[in-house]
Image: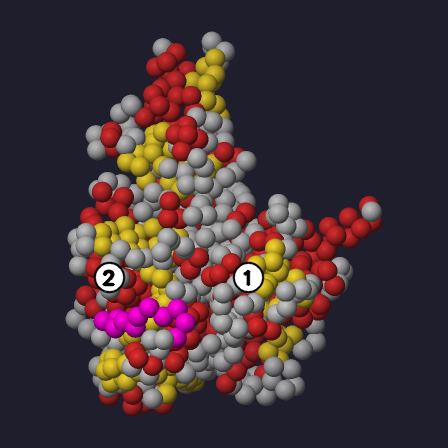
Amino acid sequence: MKKTLRTTNVSRRKFIVGTAAAGGGLALGFKLPFIGSAEAATAAGTEVNAWVVVRPDSTCVVRIARSEMGQGTLTGLAQLVAEELECDWKKVATEHVFPGQNLARKRVWGDMATGGSRGIRGSQDYVRRGGAAARIMLMQAAADQWKVPVGELTVSNGVITHAASKRSTTYGKVAVAAAKLTPPDPKTIKLRDPKDWKIAGRPMKRLDTADKLNGSKVYAIDVKLPGMLNAAVKACPVHRGKLVSYDEAKVANMPGVRRVVKVNDGAVAVVADTWWRAKTALEALPIVWDEGANAEQSSATIAERLKEGLTADDAFADTKIGDALKTIASAPKKVEAVYSTPFLSHATMEPMNCTAKVTLDRVEVWTATQSAEGSLAAACEEAGLPLEKGEVHKLDLGGGFGRRGGTQDYTRQAVAIAKQFPGVPVKLIWSREEDQAHDFYRPISQCKMSAGLDESGKLLGMHIRVSGQSINAWLNPGAIKEGKDTRQLQGMWKEPGDAQFGYSVPSLQIEYAMRNTHVPVGPWRGVNTNQNGVYLECFMEEVARASGKDSLEFRRELMSNHPKHLAVLNAAAEKGDWGKPLPAGVHRGIAQFMGYGSYSAATAEVSVSADGKVKVHRMVLALNCGHAVNPDQIAAQVEGSVVYGLSAALYGEVTVEKGRMVELNFHNYRLLRLAEMPRVETVIVPSYDFWGGVGEPTICVVTPAVLNAIFAATGKPVRSLPLKNVKLV
Amino acid sequence: MPKLNINGKVRDVQVEAGTPLLWVIREQVGLTGTKYGCGVAQCGACSVHINGEVRRSCSVPVGELKPTDRIVTIEGLSPTSSNPVQKAWAALDVPQCGYCQSGQIMAATALLRKNPNPTDADIDAAMTNICRCGTYQRIRAGVHMAAAHLRSEAKKA
């Protein structure tokens, strides 16, 4: 039986650090919260190394440092460890590690951050070595016991055999002895060739499904602690506005209300016995804000600023091959277009929330985070305590998509509230409206593109100018060198390997003009590949049509220097039946793009009704992510990326009026529903010569493939999103 | 004070009559499988059964409920997680983050109780809960799989 070490009462969940931990790092046991202590003592198992704990029954507990938010990284990482460990997959369990523990053990589990589709590709090497090292130690322990050379032993499914003497033993029986051995040097370990994989590379069932089916899974929003209070918060609706005053007397006598508290400079919270009572009182609380000058901002003023950036002199060119501007100016045939994409919120199903407990010398938070170490830093900083005095109890996320990364604004808020109730745990939950009003949105941008063709339709030059808000400027200004923020051009970089522009154009200029706003921005599943994929691939479609060539053929001719991009495009075209007949009224579009070290392409089959309604019937997505650790979970991520992408394409926009966000719940921030879901076919074409991401890469081809199919249907390009605002016929 | 029959057990709940059933289930009764997503009956994460009908509990004030109304939450669906919908969801690895799945499962079980042989159009009409991870393709397959299981059980009986 597979069993994950999950608990229904997280308050009891803690590590017990053994005395030997400081010396060999080998006796860190886990208390299993859902069983009695006597059972726990026998079941806790032995830490063979940081990644592998073996129980007496040979259950192998794989430690997971990255966050699980639905993307399946927990199962994939366990597969990689188990593959090298040679254990019985049916007896694999998993356990999260917490950042305080990571800090105490000199970051033995490495980077815990889970973003940029790095969960597996960023840790595959050391977790596989961890699994292999544990195997080597377990086998050595058996060899020592039998006094035979380890080379005479074989292992399969956690059973070690010495054929010559017909003896066998199990991991569970030798784990204690193995833990006392000196670990092998990880650099000397030879990892298994993927072609020999037995557990990795296969569509194993997820390890974390069972408690998602019966309501027993505990998300951060479900945490219950003894004596816990609940908080509802409201920040100034205009970003960067300040709290002036509030009238606590008006709500002090409402049911359950304990206190109204200031949350730093810009927010106020009601703390009550239940969250519903806290929220009810918060809605009745008179609040005075200083909204500041940003209250004069609107979608219109922001659009004007971006438009100015399309032709301003201050842009920087990240790519400059030949003289594209001159080439285009003198070309016999020109194509020109301006595109735009809006702000988007993440809208994770589980709204932002965090439970915090603060005493004079300790801060603990229970939170859903993509950056556990970021949560620890935020909690400790807010509590005014050093990192050693904090701990983050990680709960699996009810959606992440980039929202729950390094910013940790909600964790900080929870601590700011809880520190006003020393020793009392306080759970902060954001209402959906608060969640929509105070996101770190996908940045707004516009893009001006022009291309020059010769008489025969050959592309001579292309000029791409992106104008829009910078994520780095908001979150990580240090990453901007000399005002050149290349991150906003993700997917159009000249450097190979991560997010490379996939075409060779004789004259090419790609520029970015930074135009920031007062609206917070941050990574949003796929980040800048989303809008850049739309800009490049829809404009490429316009150019292809102007050239008179087939959309696929036109692209292929520009891709001979980019064989991996081309191979994925070809795979999508082939499986997507490019060039084959379609039912009446259905049209096909195609797109390719690169991000997160992986290559993606898609075809979309779309119809547009007489009254302009779009129906996406079928999408075929091809992905080369280098190594495919779990093909079924890769397919799940591809399917999910279609839904996330289509929600944005069809409906997604958060607009700004009087400095505040307008679309505050799902009635006007519409999201895709099942009835609108196309049939999705995933084509995985791993080339096994690199490690690419999976969670994010394919989203960037979804929208351009659909828009190009609409272009085929209506004869008109769609240049602004979302589609709900575009009159198609 | 309202009396509520939740998962076959009648309980007194000490709350204001206007409190949404969702928050009574989560905060007073302590069953957290039913989720808060939007509070305005849009997303369906809070779906429960009331007298066999699927309802969005964030928008049902407890004052409107009678002690005789039978409320079933995800925890009360099957003591062994062996409802055909739950089994199909496991077989197809439907959940990703899982947060919306309680509601999806409650919506699917209500659909199949009324219509053991749903077409794709029936599923489109009945399954209107939002999933941000994008599990819709597998939800559709899961409803069909559970329906096929129910039909084969019915044949045996």
Query: What is the quadrant of residue A337 in the picture?
Result: bottom left
**Main SS of the magenta segment?**
strand
- Can residue B138 be seen in this snapshot? no
**Quadrant where the image shows the C terminus of chain A:** bottom right
Front in this rendered view, residue A102 or A135: A102
Of labels 2 and 1, the one closer to you: 1
Q: Residue at x 67, y 78 (%)?
A: A585
Tell me where residue B89 appears, x and y as whole percent.
61, 52
Residue position marked by numbered label 2 in the rendering: A419
**Apparent side of residue A490 relative to residue B149 in the rendered image (left or right):** left
Q: Under tag 1, what secondary structure?
A: strand
Please provide the residue range marked out in magenta: A254-264
User: What's the chain of the residue with tag 2?
Assistant: A
Q: Is residue A232 above or below residue A463?
A: above
Q: Residue at x 22, y 52 (%)?
A: A362
- Label 2: few (<14), some or many (≥20) within 10 Å? many
Q: Is residue A338 above or below residue A507?
A: below
User: What's the chain of the residue with tag 1?
Assistant: B
Front in this rendered view, residue B35 or A309: B35
Label of residue B12 in the image:
1
Front in this rendered view, residue A491 or A79: A79
Q: Under tag 2, what secondary structure?
A: loop
